[in-house]
Image (cartoon, grey):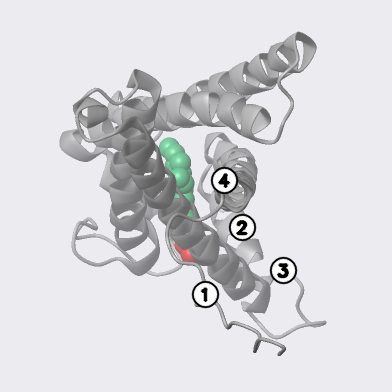
Amino acid sequence: MTSAPTLRPPRCGPVPAPSREMGLWVWKVAMALTGGVWALFVLIHLFGNLKVYLGAHAYDGYAHWLREVGYPLVPHQSVLWALRVVLLVCLVVHITAALVLRSKSRRARGAVKAAAAPTVSRWMTVTGILIAVFIVVHVLDLTVGAGVASDHFTQGSAYANLVASLSRPWMGIFYTLIMVLVAAHLWHGVVLAFNDLGTTSKRWRAVAKVIAGCVAVAIVLGNAVIPVAILVGLIR
Ligand code: HEM
């Protein structure tokens, strides 16, 4: 007599280790790539911001160009809106990846050790939250002209809006401190990204540190000096 094939119930329980590692790797790569997009944007934005030293005409011209880039090949502001969508998607994926990786590493370390999160990871979380708050404040302040924006905000007057906003001591100091945090976040971020993407040899670690250092110095020298220059009246 032949026995009927037995139907085994699907296995439940812990996910096999290779697939768990694959999931972890996918989140790490997503985090590195989306962080890279933002880092690139911050560097390009920094070069645009340097036009502030050339005066109102040059700076407003740059802001105007941002809205018109691609026209008449594409409609007005469409490149700008495409960039906004890409940045928003990258921000959401970056924050989601950070939360997922944080919870996975907490689970892996166990509940008892959870309180002792590594310093770098905690530092990245704190600076990341502060930078996210800055982005909201910054867009309201200089793009939308609502909430925290200065009373003198006028659409299309990027230079005057910048000077009016950062002349307020609390806002100028806030921008300066945040630029230092952005530089520090990017410094660690670039080193971690190289590591997560598998470039762990001594030589690649050195390359990562040099790139990270250049990015951080550029942001501090380029961006953080702007609010200071406005606060002391060098840019007005
Ligand atoms: C001192 C440093 C900075 C200055 C002076 C500055 C200046 C400006 C100005 C004037 C605008 C408005 C442009 C316009 O609407 O015409 C703007 C927009 C923006 N900035 Fe900055 N920025 C600085 C740093 C940063 C940093 C570090 C980030 C990112 C972490 C950032 C992200 C953005 C974003 C997302 C927008 C909105 C772009 C849009 O949707 O139109 N900025 N910035």
Looking at the picture, how far across and down is residue 33, in whole percent? 64, 48
Residue 17, numbered label: 4
| First in sequence: mark 1 vs mark 2 | 1
Residue type, numbered disc 3? Val
C-alpha gap between disc 2 and disc 3:
12 Å
- Assign a secondary structure to mark 4: helix
8 displayed left or right of 159: right
- Would you say residue 133 is visible in this rendering? yes
Residue type, numbered disc 2? Gly
Query: Is there CB contact under 8 Å for labels 2 and 3?
Result: no
Residue type, numbered disc 1? Pro
C-alpha gap between disc 2 and disc 4:
55 Å
- Residue that numbered label 1 is attached to: 10
> In the image, which is nearer the foreground, mark 2 or mark 3?
3
Residue lying furthest front: 1
- Residue that numbered label 3 is attached to: 69
| First in sequence: mark 2 vs mark 4 | 4
Query: Is there CB contact under 8 Å for labels 1 and 4?
Result: no
Residue depicted at x 65% and y 44%: 40
- Assign a secondary structure to mark 1: loop
- Would you say residue 234 is visible in this rendering? no
- Residue that numbered label 2 is attached to: 61
Looking at the rendered image, the quarter that the C terminus falls into is top left
* Above/below status of 227 relative to 45: above
> In the image, which is nearer the foreground, mark 1 or mark 2?
1
